Amino acid sequence: MDLNQVTDYVLAAGLTDKLSIQKNNNHLKFSCPFAQWTHEGSDANPSFTVSVHDDGASTFRCFGCGQKGKFWQLFTTLSIYSGSDQLREMGQALMAEESRPSTLISRVVGGLGTPQYVREVYDMDPLWNWFDTNLPNATVCNPGGHYLIQRGFDSRTWRDFGCRWDERDNRVVFPVYTLAGKFVGASGRTLGEDDNKWKHYWGTRTELGFVSPVYYEGETKTYILVEGPFDAMRCWQHLTKLGLAGIVMPVAISGCSISREQIDQIELEQLLTWVMFDNDTAGNKGANQAHKLLERRVPCCEDLTEKLPPNKDPNELQLHEFRETISL
């Protein structure tokens, strides 16, 4: 993270304003945001510094009250003093960002991918390089992150999916991978009144892959097939709360008609597979087709679509409804 990015976070959190920031090399200086609690209400002679170090790490320190720590801890500590959920979310997002690698070498799905294999794929793939270079992560500092928060997704969830922000076209972008970890394209939403969905980006073939979590731990035992990225993200958020994230893996097929290539990849994994499409006419038809195609090709395939409340999709499920649907 560079000094400009640090400044963006400081301003987005309302810790100070542009006119009050003093920049000096790799340091920011402004009035202590803890002042009302630790400086008897005032820090007239600014004593608070945020520093960006040569290794990219950022830290803060107040020479008045003695508060210090990593940059992300600034937000989580302030949230304790102020009770602000926004500051807590920002701190958690920064902590997650700091703890993850810059390349997606941690994606290991169903035993087919290995960190070394994935590293080689991404290093060689010009499509991935373009995507990674030109589309920044969705964060609380850009409209992509704001949109996802409004949709009820916490920062951990959309960072686990590697969500990106396309400023030029006002889009939230979801990367699409094969189950072996190969990047094949992207899908997402264009922000606006119509909230338009789209599946294809730069002519890529999203029918070859899935929208699913990029970062997770544990050996996957079960797939949940869903229609769209938001369905997958909602399932992942619920699975995280239930302690099953990674063991149960939601994968979005980008529609209600599963492709032959997707079927072949799921067959290779040989895992228990649940189909959970939207409980409407199109969703039930697609779920029935997927179930028929998969039931003889994987150890066990169960269609859960009709267990959803009528005319609901997985993205609309509350935690207790999701739990009931997967019979926990």
Image (cartoon, rainbow, N blue to C red):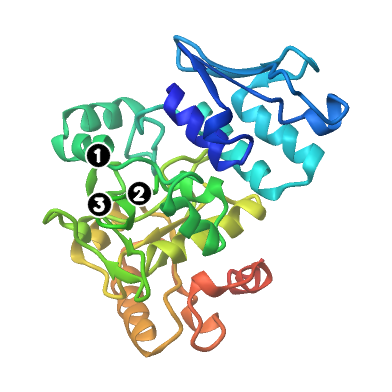
- Tell me where residue 81 sits by quadrant: top right
Residue 197, relative to residue 279: is it above or below? above
Please report contact status of discs 1 and 3: CB closer than 8 Å, yes or no: no
Task: Find disc 2 in the rendering and name its residue.
Answer: 165
Image coordinates for residue 116, horizontal then vertical, percent: 31, 25
Q: Is residue 89 left or right of residue 257?
A: right
Task: Find disc 1 in the rendering and name its residue.
Answer: 134
Earlier sequence position, callout 1 versus callout 3: 1
Q: CA distance from mark 1 to mark 2?
A: 9 Å
Residue 51, relative to residue 82: is it above or below? above
Q: Which mark is residue 88?
A: none
Discs 2/3, front: 3
Earlier sequence position, callout 1 versus callout 2: 1
Discs 1/3, front: 3
Describe the element under mark 3 as helix, strand or loop: loop
Q: Residue at x 74, y 32 (%)?
A: 77
Q: Residue at x 38, y 28 (%)?
A: 102
- Tell me where residue 276 sits by quadrant: bottom left
Q: Which mark is residue 168?
A: 3
